[in-house]
Image (cartoon, helix red, strand yellow):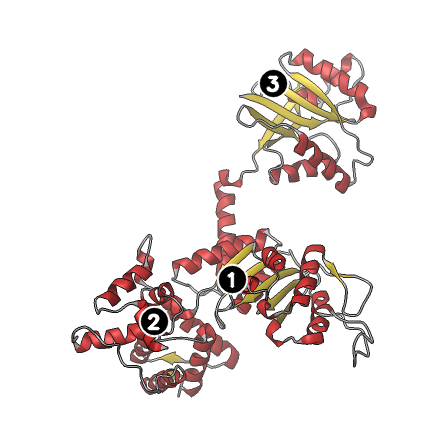
Amino acid sequence: MKRVVIGVLGTVLDKRGKRENRWNKWRPTVGLCQQPDVPIDRLELLHQPRDRGMAEQVAQDIIQVSPTTEVKLIPVQLKNPWDIEEVYTTLLDFAEHYTFDPENEEYLIHITTGTHVVQICWFLLTEAHYLPAKLIQTMPVRERKEEEQVAVPAGNYSIIDLDLSRYDKISTRFRQLSENSVSYLKAGIATRNATFNRLIEEIERVAIRSKAPILMIGPTGAGKSFLAHRIYELKLDRHQISGQFVEVNCATLRGDSAMSTLFGHVKGSFTGAQNDRSGLLRMADNGMLFLDEIGELGLDEQAMLLKAIEEKRFFPFGGDKEVQSHFQLIAGTHRDLRKQVSEGLFREDLYARINLWTYHLPGLAQRSEDIEPNLDYELAKFAREQGEQNRFNVESRRKYLSFATSPGALWSGNFRELGASVTRMATLAESGRITDSVVCDEIARLQNGWGYGAEEEPLPELEQPIDLFDRYQLKSVLDVCRASSSLSEAGRKLFAISRQLKQNPNDADRLRKYLARFGLSWEKIKTSSE
């Protein structure tokens, strides 16, 4: 494999010595080609057109010390080599037009010559993989001869590989930082649901590396707002944003007030507008905007939002002068936006723009194994907010968890409802103990809220009599089916724990086979409940 070095002419160090004494001085580019253990097949030497003569002299000297090295002189025009924008753009243009052949050539970027800005830009382009290369740095070396320090013209070198996976200690530190970020997004809750853990791990990577919109889909109370706020705090801690976290539920916006609330308005733009208003998008400048229930926005607001996302500027309501706001968008919804697009209720172009990173947050009933750690989290949260520590008795904790993780626990309000349940029990606890009676009262309260007190639906007509045990089990399964929108959703709820042990769980098929034992089908159950 050929070794190719890319570098720039050093107009100070490479120029040292105009006659024979130049061979007694260290010159970075020439010295690089004098390294016996780093033979160079080709040197791509970038230089300013005005320095062509100097570049040719350096090329001739390289041929003398390394006859096998091909030197290619590449003129590059820079008006100001200390202007980072100009330098980065020029070197990026070079990288994009250069024909790299990594299958047959190894590339090194010489970062010793050029201004500090040039060296920084080489580093940034290599780190961003625009240059499939390692960095090489040369340095002078002096040897002591008798009482005198004598320069060694070849100098020394060091190769820097920016692939951090090669450095165990550094990569271990990065993994630890990533794990800390994931834990932060989960508020330190040791969730046990493998699917949810993988989802949060990906969200962590996207949140750190991307400024693109994020769309979170999930039922009310699944934690969309909470997670959006944690993402904001994570990015704020990494100094990726500096502005505010601005949150609004789009379901509360109607008519002109929606336009005014989001985009602001100018004085006199509508009846009662006596002053200018900046709007939430401008409040989120350099920060994060969380639009919960984005599916409730009107089509006009959607069109303006799309422009604001893509162009970072928009017109306030009633205004003829654009304003700017650089914000990152997180959108939340419980609706099927694809269906809304097909029905003409949501703009297809806006959906395409916010659908780059889409995450479906499961409800509490789909994460029954996470109820226990979230129960502990809610108790600790109550203690922090109220300054009062409460604990379950052993039996009362077992009873509550047994009920909370059972198939009949609907948790229609998801984590918000669990938090309210814990708050009620902690408030009613005497002497810091949540007793069996407190738990029983809370279970009855939850069941009543889920409609358990209403007349229960009878079992469908079965082909043959079944035992009482099977009858009670079947009743719980049917309750879950009736509360689910699909066979797959019901299967995920019923097999929430055992499905984690299967590599390719097929919950719908398991549930279908169970129902078939009693001569039942999904269609028959849903028809009988209508």
**Amino acid type assigned to the residue bearing label 1 in the image:** Leu
Q: Position of residue 389 (x, y in %)?
A: 44, 80
Residue carrying label 3: 41
Q: Residue at x 50, y 76 (%)?
A: 384
Q: Earlier in the sequence, mark 3 or mark 1?
A: 3
Q: Residues within 10 Å of mark 1 (few under 14, many from 20)?
A: many
**Amino acid type assigned to the residue bearing label 3 in the image:** Asp
Residue 10 falls left or right of residue 446: right
Q: Position of residue 433 (x, y in %)?
A: 37, 83
Which residue is nearer to you in this view: 143 or 152?
A: 152
Residue 303 falls left or right of residue 477: right
Q: Position of residue 352 (x, y in %)?
A: 59, 55
Q: Where is residue 362, by image quadrant? A: bottom left
Residue carrying label 2: 481
Q: Residue at x 43, y 58 (%)?
A: 197
Q: CA distance from mark 3 to mark 1?
A: 50 Å
